[in-house]
Every structure is written in structure tokens, then in C-alpha cells.
Amino acid sequence: MSMAAKGIGTLKFLLTCWKLNLASAMEYRLSFFMLAGMMFINNFMWLFFWSLFFGRFQVVNGWDLSDVMMLWAVGAGGFGWANMLFGNFNRIAPIVSGGQLDVYLSQPKPVLLHVLASRMSLTAVGDFMFGLVIYGWVGDHSLRGALLFTAGLIISGVLIMAVTIIGGCLSFYVGNSEGIANQVFNSFLALSTYPSDIFRGFAKALLFSIIPAGFISYLPIGLMRDFDAIFVLEAVAVTLGFLGIGIFFFHRGLRKYSSGNAIALRG
Amino acid sequence: MNAMNAMNAMKLMKAAAVARITWRQQLAYKTDFLMRSSFLLLILFVFVQLWGAAYQGDTTRVINGYTLKQIIWYLVFTEAITMAVPALCGLIENEVKSGDIAIRLIRPFSYVGYHYSSYLAEAIFRFFIHLAIGSIIAWTFAGPPSFGVGWAGLFALTLGAITIAFLLNMIVALCAFWVEETRGMEFVLHKLQFTVGGMLLPLDLMPEWLQRICAWMPFQAMLYFPARTAVNYGEASLLQQFGIQAAWIVVLAAAVMFMYRRGVAKLHVNGG
């Protein structure tokens, strides 16, 4: 089979997964809208805090309220689409340690992609909508602005997913690492929602290297407000690099994977 | 009179036994504790950076009665209290849904009293652990907590604070008798603590209109009172703060007892 045909086949498969996930979410419509609405309010409460904070300080290390709002738009929006389309990315650790990979391994589809696309997070819809609403509120609505915002969403979503996959893959090597994987995920999300310029020295160096949250939290400035080509290139390279490492870890981990005699089925 | 005293002593012994069991349970899950604690360290580190940037590193600057050091320690205290509060809503919701509540109801100990004993033991344990962990960050970046009698104010008001937190959570949890899901309401409660409770920002730094609203809510008595008293002792009368806490405890306890009586009367548990 040619590469193009394989690519089209995979895309069709993904579209079917997403369609089924959406249909399944819509079975529980009330719960779906409630959870999405809750996440929307949650993010909004954070912005309320920031509005009080900036009401007192106006500008902090070059950041004002609209920059932080865009940071939340790009962070929550990126997390939202990633968790809507690839909602298992933060559940790799329990899937591996619970021996639930068997069902994916037995099917002729790319294992990691299949695992990731097999779930849609209901709360994530609220995050994604929140991102769009905040962009509509304070973002740059020109074509250039919209394209840069879209690029920011892609970078933040893929980077959050890549770092979380790496954390989840620890389960292949150290057994049940659900706690550590959750910690990696929560810490990374927390770090990526504060202005990168409040950090100094070693902490800042970490945020732009092994804990690459800075490549998300600097997007409102380096990508959208004062376009900095070097930062953007670095952000893209780091995102692809971490994604590559995640995929590599997952496939290396598969060789070590073992499961018990539990029979797993997907509903 | 003697019989009354003996009964009260018995009740206290039961509560102490529940507290002992809870402490043992807490000590059994050390990894979980370490995880939560490391997250607290991270969050406090981020706050140190954020407020350091807001104060432009100036340790002598005073904003609305707070120096940088006072703000950092204030956040340690509010975080320690917030993270001390155990997740009560999920626990009670599960007991009602699964029917496990029946086991608790047949025991010779009040249902709310049982949960309060267990809650208090866990909350006190977690408060001191989180306070110790948070202090590492604050001491390192902001200096020693030389608050003198402020510490006495903190500990005295924290007991009332976690009792108010219990009652607020219990009100939401008892809704499980009528509705299937209390998660949404618990979520709103947490968000109110987070903002109007002064968890991330002392109420003194908020706009005047918001401060006026907060003054009429129970949330300030939960986080703001103990933390503000610790770092700014004497700013407000301790007696007045105790009075407000006591008034809220009476009002909320009455609401809890009313809801519990109404709820348990309509409870049906099948099988077992």
C-alpha cells in the first residue's frame, strides 16, 4: 500500500473515532453540557483572579491583563482541542498498568494514535470554547492574528500532549506510575498558565528546556504580540522534538509491556 | 448529672477513636501525600515568583498593609488550610448512592458527628504537614515567619475555619439525598473559596465593592481571617473574628442538621 493511501486510511480511521466519540458523548447530553460549562466557569474564575491582580498592579514584567487573557486562551484552547480529539493522552499510565493495551495491540491500526483517539474528554469542550471566546474578546481579529492564534493553539496542544505522553510512558518502565504521570501533567499545566517573564535564572532556564512550559506561556508575547521568529522556530522544534521523544518512548515501552489474563473490551 | 457526664465522655471517646483510625489511614498513603505536597511546593514557588515580580523584588514596599514577606506567608497559610480540607462531598455521595450509609446509620454514633471527627482528624493532620512543607518555600524565599502572637491567632482561628469548611462541604454533600451529582455544586463552592475567600489574594487588595460583598459571606472566615491574623495581627479584633466565625458555625450547623433530618427521613436503602 502506498504511503498516500495509508495516510488517507489513517485519516478516515481517525474521523470515524472522533465521530463515534462525539456520538457517545451526546448520549449523555446534560452531563456533557454541564461538564463543559463547569470547565468554562473554572477558567473564567482564574481570569477573575487575574483581573483583580492586574487591577492592583497593571503591568508585571511587561505583561498586562490582555496578555494573560491570551495566555489562557492559547493554553486552555490548546489543551481543549488536544483533549477533545486525543482524550486518552493523559490516561496512558492507567491504561498500560491496567493491562488495557491488549485491545489496541490486537487491531491493525497505529497503536498510539488509536489509544489517543479512543476517548473524548467532555470537559475539554469547555476549555476549547473558552479559548475561542477569550480570543474573540481580546485577540487580534485580523487574518494574520487569527493564523497566529491558530498556530499557538496547535503548538500548545501538541506540546501538552507530548509532555504528558512521556510522563505516561513511565508506566512501561516502573510499573504503576499513575500518580507520577498525573503529577507531571498537573505541574506542566500549572506552569504553562503563568506569565513566563515572572521567572528568573535557573527556573526560567528549566521552563525553556526540560520542562518546556515556557514555550506555551511565552506564546502570547513571542508569537502573537511581538512576533519573534527565533522563539517561534524554537517552539516548533521543541514541540516536534518532545512529540518525537513521546512516540519513541511509547514504542520502546511496548516491547516491555505485559498484561495479565484480564479480558478488556471497548464499549 | 453523673450520667450526663459519662455520656459526654463516651461520645468524646468515640470521636477520638474515629480520629485515631483516620490518622492511621493517612499514614498508610504516604506516596499520595508526597505527590500532593510536591505540587504545593511547585504552586508556592510560582506564587513567590509572581508576587516577587509584582513587588519588583522590593522587600520593604508595603501594599495595602502587606509586605512581600507577609503576602508569601499569607499564601502559605491559605494554601495549608485549603489543602487540609478533605474531599467530603465525593465520600458522602458514594455512601448515599451505594447504600453504605446504612452501615453508618446503625452505629451508635451520630452520622454527622462521625464524619466531623474523621474530617477534623484528617484536616488537622494535613494542615500541619502542608504548613511545614509550605514553610520551606516561604522561609527560603521570603525569610523567617517572625509573626509573634500572629501564630497564636492563626492556630486559634484555623479550628473555626476548618469547621466552617466542614459545614459548607457537608451542606453540599447532603444534597446527595436529593440529587444524584453533587460535583457541580462542590465545584462552585471551591471556586467561591478560591476568589471571595481570599485564597490567592488577601481581601484588602481587592476592590472596595468586592470587599463589601465578601464581608457578608462565610468564606472570608475560612481562609482570610486566620491567614490575615497570622501576618497582620492586631489589624482586626480577634474577638470580632471569633464572633463572626461562631455566628457562621451556628447558622451553617443549623442548616446541616435541618438538611440531614429531612434527607435521612426520605432515604431508602435496598438489599445489603
Image (spheres, rainbow, N blue to C red):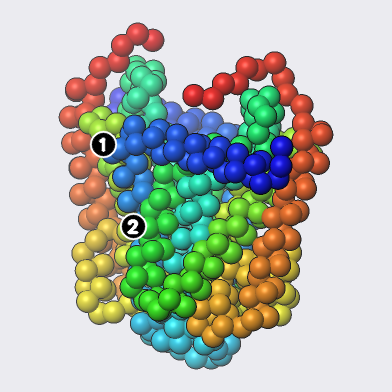
Q: Chain of mark 2?
A: A
Q: Position of residue B265 (x, y in %)?
A: 19, 23
Q: Is residue A246 visible?
A: yes
Q: Residue at x 70, y 16 (%)?
A: A261
Q: Residue at x 65, y 54 (%)?
A: A162
Callout 2 amino acid: Ile
Q: Residue at x 62, y 66 (%)?
A: A213
The residue to which callout 2 is attached is A41
Q: Is residue B168 left or right of residue A24?
A: left
Give the CA separation, mark 2 to mark 1: 21 Å
Q: Chain of mark 1?
A: B
Q: Is residue B71 above or below residue B182?
A: below
Q: Position of residue A217 (x, y in %)?
A: 56, 71
Q: Secondary structure at mark 1?
A: helix
Numbered tag placed on residue A39 in the rendering: none
The residue to which callout 1 is attached is B175
Q: Is residue B167 left or right of residue B233?
A: left
Quarter holding the N terminus of chain A is top right
Q: Nearer the viewer, mark 2 or mark 1?
A: 2
Callout 1 amino acid: Cys
Give the crowd class for mark 1: few <14, some 14-19, many >=20 residues within 10 Å: some
Between B220 and A250, the one lying in front of the other is: A250
Between B201 and A30, the one lying in front of the other is: A30
Q: Is residue A90 above or below residue B105?
A: below
Q: Position of residue B45 (x, y in %)?
A: 61, 69
Between A17 and B87, the one lying in front of the other is: A17
Q: Is residue A138 above or below residue A112?
A: below
Q: Is residue A166 left or right of residue B166?
A: right
Residues marked 2 and 1 touching at CB (< 8 Å): no
Count of marks overlaid on the render = 2
